[in-house]
Image (cartoon, rainbow, N blue to C red):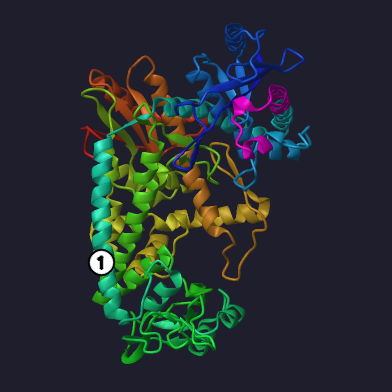
Amino acid sequence: MRITILDVENTVTTKNNKLHLDPFERGNTLVMVGVHPLDTQNTSTYIFDHSDITKDDDLISNRFAVQNILDKTDILVGHNISHDLIWLWESGFKYTGKVFDTMLCEYIFNRGLPSSLGLGAVAIKYNCNVLKQDTLKEYFKKGYSTRDIPRAELELYLRHDVESTLEVYNKQQARLSTPEDSGLRNTIEITNEVAVVLTRMYQSGFKINIEALKNVKTEFVSEKNELENKLNSFTKELMGDTPINLSSPEQLSWVLFSRKLINKKAWAECVNPYTPLPVFKSLIRSNFKTLYKTKATKCIPCVGKGSFYKKKKDGNPFKNRTKCSTCIGSGFIYTPLSKIAGLKFTPPSAKWASANGFGTSKGNLEILQRFASSKGMDEAKVFLGQLTRLSAINSYLSNFVEGIANYIKPDGLLHVRLNQHITATGRFSGSNPNMQNMPRGSTFPVKKVFVSRFDGGKILEADFAQLEFRVAAYLSQDPVAIKEVTEGFDVHNYTAKVITDAGQPTTRQVAKMHTFAPLYGATGYGRTIAEATYYEHFKNKYKGIAKWHKKLASQVTGKGFIRIPSGREFKFLNVKRKRDGTVTNFTQIKNYPVQSFATADIVPLVLVEIYNKLDGLNSCVVNSVHDSIVIDVHPEEKGEVLNIISKVQNNLIPLLKSKYHVEVNVPLLLEAKIGTNWLEQKEVA
């Protein structure tokens, strides 16, 4: 078996103030390739695009030399191998063998703990040879392109990276032979398989309908303007003439809690998240003043300008204006009226304390909105609903609409990049842009801009039904959960019934957000009484899951780590028992096994299976979000693709057994829907 260490150097383009390191950006080129087959002694470098190319360089022979090495390679090793693969493939090289990514291997060795995964940091960790000075950074600071860096220095840098990767690889292989780490080998092998498929998906790209993207932007901007106008009017009603910037957490806190902090330093010194509630209430009274609506009148001394020219002894004005001390530069005098301003909320605990008064995070706003709804505070409910929606719209515009526009390539495709090494649990994260943060459900309008590259083609989404709940049922062996999954019990309907019976009428769709939340450590804290009733009901109903959670806590306090059925492990540092019997980091301890086995082990495994079965077809995998896999379907291959999804669905349990050696006794369901774009889809019967 021939193993080859490889690294590439390429140019980088800056567009829209973003760095583009990929080969899809016009102007980017492959500059140099470094290789070290393990059956040879030295690293060789091959040049392809450099300002120092000489007459002795034969670019054609360099290409043949690299391809010849790839043809004889069984395992290609690199640090962040996806980057190397995409440059090789897009530069015309062929490689279909296995890969080993030293970065991903180290990530799995870390067992969910944060650690720098750059080659330099990992090399230092293993006491490998490292460059004392990164001269390339200095060239980049001066504006040099990779192709303009002196050839000798670039070759030295490339050789060093290849040799560092080789040293790291050898150290990691040694670790995989130890009792402590050998159990991770299967996870590492499958992770490397997935890396190849994700790189092929990245290469394929997802077609964007530019006109549809413009229309979505127009709709969002229109809604944003309307919301801003409504909120500005609403704020004026609540605060009088006091100028308020709702983007300021401090000023938003004034509106929500009708109080203004007197002394920020004193407040920071006297309160902390664990301050008892009676003490916290007393501190609020002594550190805040109540705000009242105001009436603005023009400041007389400065005539409403906020500043004026002082005069010299000779009667001539000074060159610069002086800030008016009467109105403190605002131009207006704000006279308090008799009515208290704002929405008059009271923060429920000291955990809401912040440097500027009280926290106004998204989570806090959601809690206040639920409270307002349960108490019939219609004015507050409407205001908070509009505020939350405006925040979402701003996020959609910047993260998705602008994000997609910034990263569409000259080929008209968005090349979807998924990472395996960012999240603690191993589930995918996205970049440029991160579509893993898309709202769940089938109503997000941005999805309509994703279309097929084929005339008459379709977009198919294969989506797991309730995957994480089914995984929790399997991992905990909770008999009630297993029975409900097996019989097709509608758990969301049941959630809605519990909340409604507790005095808060709700729908199945709204209730879905609560159904599985307790799986991930959510409690009834901050919820309405009716919602808190459901959270308590969940623990009583699924006693097996609650018991399993306690077992996980005991494992962590005893061994310091958790191992899940796939072999993946998670380490937790300094976990301690609390007085109530729970442990620190309990939310992560409950969350990691479910999320990881579901979306870091099962979904990627199915992604590889579908990709392999699509081999030979024009249809291709173009994305994976949460627990779904998205396929661009050629019009003549719809039947074949649907048949592939059906076969994969029918073989899910045996597939898991063959790869992870587990007997999953809970049915898993992979459903398909298809349409002309990613939004407008119909379920496949």
Relative to 493, say whether 237 is above or below.
below
Q: Quadrant of residue 128?
A: top right
In this rendering, the answer to whether 225 lies above or below 200 is below
Seen in the picture, residue 25 relative to 268 is either above or below; the reply is above
Quadrant where the image shows the C terminus: top left
Residue, far bottom? 338
Locate residue 589 relative to residue 505 in the image: left or right: right
- Quadrant (top left/top right/bottom left/bottom right) for the N terminus: top right
Frontmost residue, 538 versus 357 = 357
Asked whether residue 482 is in view, the answer is: no
**x, y (%) of residue 171?**
74, 30
- Place of residue 322 in the rendered image (x, y in percent of width and height, measured from the top left): 49, 80
**Magenta range:** 137-163
- Residue that appears at 71% across and 28% down: 157
Q: Residue at x 27, y 31 (%)?
A: 459
Amino acid type at circle 1 is: Asn
Locate residue 336 relative to residue 428 in the image: left or right: left
**Secondary structure character of the magenta stretch overall:** helix
x, y (%) of residue 205?
38, 28
Residue hosting label 1: 229
Q: Nearer the viewer, residue 305 or 441?
A: 305
Residue, far front: 314
Magenta stretch: includes residue 193? no
- Residue 148 is one of the magenta-drawn residues: yes
Instruction: Mark 1: give few (<14), some (14-19) or many (20+) Cα within 10 Å.
Output: few
Q: Is residue 557 visible?
A: yes
Up/down of 328 relative to 475, above or below: below
Instruction: Give how far across and how far down residue 239 sits, in percent.
Output: 32, 81
Instruction: Tell me the SS state at disc 1.
Output: helix
